[in-house]
Amino acid sequence: MYNMGARGHASRCPWLLLCAVFAFLAGRFIPQAEAGCAERENPNCCTGRNNECHELSRRRTVCYCDTYCTKTGDCCEDYQRVCQISAIDCVVGPWAGWSECSAPCGVGSKERSRQVTVPPRNGGAPCPDLKQRRGCYGHGPLCSSAKEVAKILPDSFKRNFKDPWRRPHMLMKEEMPSYCVQLRVKQASAPCRLNMWSAQLVRERSVCAECQSDAMDSNQHCGGDGLETIRTFWTAASVPGCHGSWVRESSSENCRCPMHSLLFV
């Protein structure tokens, strides 16, 4: 039993020794195929982070040829030689000026941008942010007008009447021509529905409001007569709790609004 085991072991030794010698000579004299970024179809290298941009290393393990591999340390062995020598990083121009505040009055935002002058190629560094945004607070010349609150009444409250007593202060006041403003209602409170004339003030309805001479200030203007593209506010003078907002659509001089319209107070 012992002798047979010794013979069996001795009979395997020549084969093990021969295999070891062959493996050594194969690694020494037979060139190994170099796999990696150079073996990929064009483009060999990828910009940014791209998990599909991979190949096999000499050890037949997965390696990567994207720019992100330099951070994770899993680049192919030939990444530096293939990708980095001809890599062109992104180059951007200077920042342009900041835009105007998006809100003429109140909180808004402004932006600035820059252009790419040289796009990245062959695994070069990707482009940085091309746009920036920051908050702003609009305080243009119209802001004071936007803060005005219009007081309105139905056109049944006619003014510009002739004074039967011909009082001096009425005779001395110069009568100015009326102007009309077309406004689109954006919001109305619930109490507006409690009165027949104010019930017409519903969301997205267009209404005409007339500014007559008696309601004008020294600038021949009715307070709170609205601004285009900017929401302003109104309140119904004879309906408690009725208020809302609107946006001016148009205005015209020397005009009269049709029946069942509004008057500025």
Image (cartoon, rainbow, N blue to C red):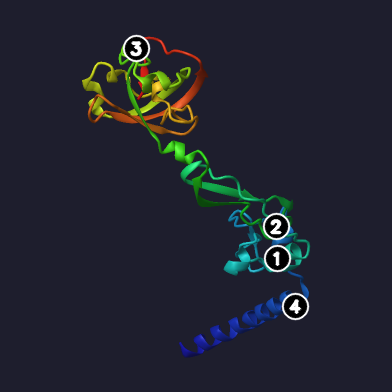
Residue sitting at the far top:
259
Q: Amino acid at mark 3?
A: His
Residue 83's image quarter?
bottom right
Residue 122's image quarter?
bottom right
Q: Nearer the viewer, residue 24 or 170?
A: 170
Front of the two marks 4 and 2: 2
The answer to whether the residue labelled 3 contacts the one labelled 4, judged by CB atoms less than 8 Å apart, is no
Which comes before the other along the chain, label 1 or label 4? 4
Which comes before the other along the chain, label 2 or label 3? 2
Gap between marks 2 and 3 measured at Cα:
74 Å
- Residue 248, given in percent of the width and then of the height, sits at 46, 26
Front of the two marks 1 and 4: 1
Q: What residue is drawn where x is 39% and y is 22%? A: 214
Q: Is residue 20 left or right of residue 5?
A: right
Residue 32's image quarter?
bottom right
**Circle 2 is placed at which residue position?**
45
**Circle 3 is placed at which residue position?**
260
Q: Amino acid at mark 4?
A: Arg
Q: Is residue 146 left or right of residue 152?
A: right
**Circle 1 is placed at which residue position?**
79
The answer to whether the residue labelled 2 contacts the one labelled 1, judged by CB atoms less than 8 Å apart, is yes
- Residue 170, given in percent of the width and then of the height, sits at 37, 20
Rate crowding at label 4 as few (under 14), some (14 to 19) or many (20 or more) other CA atoms within 10 Å.
few
Gap between marks 1 and 3 measured at Cα:
80 Å
